[in-house]
Image: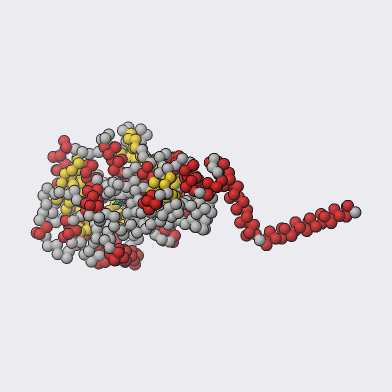
C-alpha cells in the first residue's frame, strides 16, 4: 500500500514537475525577468555590503553618495548651474552634483552607478567649465561630477623618457592655470585653444585647436599619458605603450570611455614676447593660397601661429571681440579702402621671440611676409607678452560680460572643410547664405591632417589640408536665435548637397545614424571601445551618441 501511495506520490510529483516545466516554457519571458530581478536584488545587497551601506539608502542616491564621504550638492542652485552651458539652449537638471577632491571620489561615483547594472537609468557626466554648446556636459536626472574641484599641476622641467619637458595636470584644471604654472618654470604647452578658460579634460575630449595646430597638431596630439576612470569605475593608466586603445580612444572620445583624471602634456620653452601681425585681403583665393603656402612650409623659419578671419563688413574689421587687445602700431586708414558691400579676409600671424632677439625677429618676419599677396600697406603689428597673447580672448569676454552679452545663447557652428571645397564654401556661405551679415566672429584657418593621429577618436575630413570654419554667432533675442539656428541648418544642408565631406567640430548630432556617418571608418572602433570601457552606457549622456533608456539595445 505504502508502496502504491509512494508510486502515486512520485507519479504526481513527476506530473507536477512536467507541468512546472511546461509553464516555464510557456512563460519564458516572465521567467527571464524574475531571474534578472532576483539577480539584481542579490547584487544590490552585495553592493551595499561592499560599500558598507544600509539597504534603503541604496535607493536614496544622494544620501548614498554622501555615505561615500563625497561632497554632494542637491540644492536648486547647484542643480540649475549643472544644467547650464555656454550654448544656453539646453537644460537637463541632474539629480545631484558631486565635487570631487580625489580620484577615489570620481571612482566611487562611477563604480556605484556601474554596479547598479545596465537597467538602471542613472548616468554620469564629467563637467569641465560647461563651455559646451548643446548640453554635452549635462546628465538629466543623473550625476554631474564637477571636475573643477579636482585640481593639481606638477611641472617637470626634465624630459625624462620623453622628448620634451612635461606637465602632469588634473582633468579639471583650466588651461589658463596650466599656463600660469608652467610659465613660472619658463615653459608652456605647445598647442592651444583661442580661449583658455576651458578645462584640460574638456578640450582633450574634443581635440583642442587653435592657430598652433598646423605646426603641433591639436592639443590631443601633444599628450604623453592619461589617467582615466573608466565607465566600470576602474582606474587605468594609458599611453602609446600602455593600454593604447583606451589612450587613443579617449583623445577626442567625447567623454564616452572614461573620465580623464590626469593628463601628461608636452611642454616647450616659452618665449617672452609675441609679435602679432595682421594683414588684409579682398581676394579669397589669394587669402587661402597664402595660408596653405604658410602651413605647408616644412623647413626653415615659419610663423608660430596662423588664423584667418572673415570680415563681412567694415564693422567686422574693427569690432572683433577676439582681438580686443590688438592696438596696432601702424594701422592703415580703412577709409582708404573701399569696403562697401565687400567681404574682407584677414590673416593673423605671430612670431615668438625673446627681447634679446628683437631685431632678428623683425628681419625674419619681413622675409616670411615677402611672398604673400595681401593688400599692400595693410600690415598691422603689435608686440605683447606671450601670456597676454594666449589669453587674448579673455579681454573680449570681460567687455561682453559688462554689457550682459556673454550669457546669451550661442548657436555656434564649427565645421571642418576640405581644402578643395573651401572656395565653394566661401561663395555659397560667406557671400551667399550669410549675406554680408554675422552676429559674431568668423574664423577660418587650415590645418595639416598629418598632424592628427588616425588612432585617436577625433575625426577630420579626408584630405591632407582642411580648414576649420567657426561661425561664432551670439543670439540677442529669441527671434534672432531662431533665425541663426535656421541659418545653420541651411549651411549644413548646403554642405551636404555640395558633397563637401565636411565634418562638424564640437558636434551635436541627434541620431545614432548621424554619429555613425560623423565617425565614418572610426565608428566600429568607437562602439567596440564603448562596449569595453563603458558597457552600461553611463558616461557623458549629453553627447547623445548612446542612450541608456533601453539598456543594451543602443550598442
Ligand atoms: P565641458 O563643456 O564641461 O565638457 C565637454 C565634454 O567633455 C562633455 O561631454 C563632458 O562630459 C566631457 N568632459 C569634461 N571633462 C571631462 C573629463 N575630465 N574627462 C572626460 N570627459 C570630460 N575649442 C577649441 O578646440 N578651440 C578653441 O579655440 C575654442 N575656443 C572656445 C572659446 C569659447 C569662448 C568657448 C566657450 C569654447 C571654445 N572652445 C574651443 C570649445 C571648447 O573646446 C569646448 O567647449 C570644450 O567642451 C571644453 O569646454 P569645457 O572644459 O568647459 O568642457
Write down the quadrant of residue 471 in the picture. Answer: bottom left
Residue 137 in view here: no
Kindly identify the residue that appears in the image at 53 percent across and 54 percent down: 119
Residue 465 in view here: yes
The one nearer the camera, 68 or 436, is 68
The one nearer the camera, 456 or 326, is 326
The one nearer the camera, 384 or 173, is 173
Where is residue 167 shown, x and y percent of the image? 34, 37
Residue furthest front as drawn: 75
Write down the quadrant of residue 420 in the picture. Answer: bottom left
Q: Quadrant of the N terminus?
A: bottom right
Kindly identify the residue that appears in the image at 31 percent across and 40 percent down: 178
Where is residue 394 shown, x and y percent of the image? 24, 48
Q: What is the count of numbered marks? A: 0
Kindly identify the residue that appears in the image at 53 percent across and 49 percent down: 59
Where is residue 360 shown, x and y percent of the image? 15, 40
User: Going by the image, does 392 lie left or right of 229?
Assistant: left
Where is residue 227 shown, x and y percent of the image? 42, 41
> In the rendered image of this protein, does residue 543 appear above or below residue 199?
below
Kindly identify the residue that appears in the image at 43 percent across and 61 percent down: 511
Residue furthest right as drawn: 1
User: Going by the image, does 466 lie left or right of 63?
Assistant: left
User: Going by the image, does 188 lie left or right of 78?
Assistant: left
> In the rendered image of this protein, does residue 493 appear above or below residue 99?
below
Colour scheme in the image?
A: secondary structure
Amino acid at each position: 500500500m505504502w508502496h502504491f501511495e509512494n508510486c502515486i506520490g512520485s507519479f504526481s510529483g513527476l506530473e507536477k514537475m512536467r507541468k512546472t516545466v511546461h509553464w516555464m516554457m510557456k512563460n519564458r519571458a516572465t521567467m527571464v525577468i524574475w531571474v534578472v530581478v532576483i539577480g539584481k536584488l542579490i547584487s544590490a545587497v552585495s553592493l551595499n555590503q561592499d560599500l558598507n551601506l544600509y539597504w534603503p539608502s541604496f535607493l536614496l542616491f544622494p544620501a548614498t553618495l554622501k555615505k561615500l564621504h563625497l561632497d554632494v550638492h542637491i540644492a536648486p542652485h547647484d542643480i540649475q548651474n549643472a544644467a547650464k552651458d555656454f550654448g544656453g539652449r539646453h537644460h537637463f537638471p541632474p539629480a545631484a552634483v558631486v565635487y570631487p577632491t580625489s580620484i577615489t571620489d570620481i571612482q566611487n561615483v562611477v563604480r556605484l552607478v556601474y554596479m547598479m547594472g545596465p537597467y538602471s537609468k542613472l548616468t554620469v557626466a564629467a563637467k569641465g567649465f560647461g563651455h559646451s554648446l548643446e548640453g554635452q556636459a549635462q546628465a538629466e536626472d543623473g550625476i554631474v561630477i564637477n571636475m573643477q574641484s579636482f585640481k593639481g599641476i606638477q611641472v617637470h622641467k626634465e624630459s625624462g623618457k620623453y622628448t620634451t619637458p612635461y606637465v602632469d595636470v588634473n582633468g579639471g584644471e583650466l588651461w589658463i592655470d596650466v599656463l600660469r604654472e608652467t610659465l613660472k618654470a619658463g615653459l608652456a604647452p605647445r598647442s592651444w585653444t583661442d580661449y583658455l578658460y576651458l578645462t584640460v579634460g574638456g578640450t582633450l575630449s574634443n581635440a583642442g585647436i587653435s592657430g598652433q595646430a598646423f605646426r603641433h597638431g591639436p592639443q590631443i596630439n601633444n599628450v604623453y599619458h592619461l589617467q582615466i576612470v573608466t565607465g566600470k569605475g576602474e582606474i587605468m593608466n594609458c599611453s602609446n605603450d600602455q593600454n593604447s586603445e583606451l589612450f587613443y580612444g579617449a583623445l577626442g572620445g567625447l567623454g564616452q570611455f572614461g573620465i580623464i583624471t590626469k593628463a601628461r602634456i608636452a611642454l616647450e620653452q616659452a618665449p617672452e614676447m609675441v609679435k602679432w601681425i595682421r594683414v588684409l585681403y579682398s581676394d579669397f583665393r589669394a587669402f587661402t593660397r597664402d595660408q596653405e603656402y604658410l602651413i605647408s612650409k616644412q623647413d626653415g623659419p615659419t610663423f608660430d601661429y596662423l588664423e584667418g578671419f572673415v570680415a563681412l563688413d567694415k564693422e567686422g574689421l574693427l569690432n572683433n571681440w577676439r582681438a580686443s587687445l590688438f592696438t596696432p602700431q601702424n594701422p592703415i586708414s580703412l577709409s582708404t579702402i573701399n569696403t562697401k558691400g565687400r567681404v574682407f579676409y584677414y590673416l593673423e600671424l605671430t612670431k615668438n621671440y625673446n627681447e634679446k632677439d628683437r631685431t632678428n625677429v623683425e628681419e625674419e618676419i619681413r622675409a616670411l611676409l615677402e611672398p604673400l599677396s595681401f593688400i599692400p600697406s595693410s600690415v598691422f603689428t603689435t608686440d605683447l607678452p606671450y601670456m597676454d597673447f594666449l589669453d587674448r580672448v579673455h579681454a573680449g569676454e570681460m567687455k561682453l560680460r559688462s554689457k550682459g552679452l556673454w550669457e546669451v545663447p550661442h548657436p555656434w557652428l564649427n565645421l571642418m572643410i576640405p581644402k578643395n571645397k573651401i572656395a565653394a564654401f566661401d561663395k555659397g556661405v560667406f557671400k551667399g547664405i550669410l549675406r554680408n551679415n554675422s552676429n559674431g566672429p568668423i574664423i577660418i584657418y587650415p590645418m595639416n591632417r598629418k598632424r592628427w593621429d588616425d588612432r585617436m577618436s577625433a575625426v577630420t575630413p579626408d584630405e591632407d589640408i582642411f580648414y576649420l570654419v567657426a561661425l561664432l554667432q551670439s543670439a540677442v533675442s529669441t527671434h534672432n536665435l531662431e533665425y541663426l539656428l535656421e541659418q545653420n541648418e541651411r549651411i549644413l544642408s548646403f554642405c551636404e548637397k555640395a558633397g563637401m565631406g565636411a565634418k562638424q567640430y564640437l558636434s551635436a548630432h541627434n541620431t545614432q545614424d548621424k554619429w555613425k556617418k560623423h565617425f565614418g571608418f572610426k565608428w566600429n572602433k568607437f562602439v567596440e571601445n564603448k562596449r569595453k570601457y563603458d558597457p552600461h552606457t553611463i558616461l557623458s549622456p549629453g553627447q547623445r551618441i548612446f542612450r541608456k533608456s533601453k539598456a543594451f539595445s543602443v550598442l
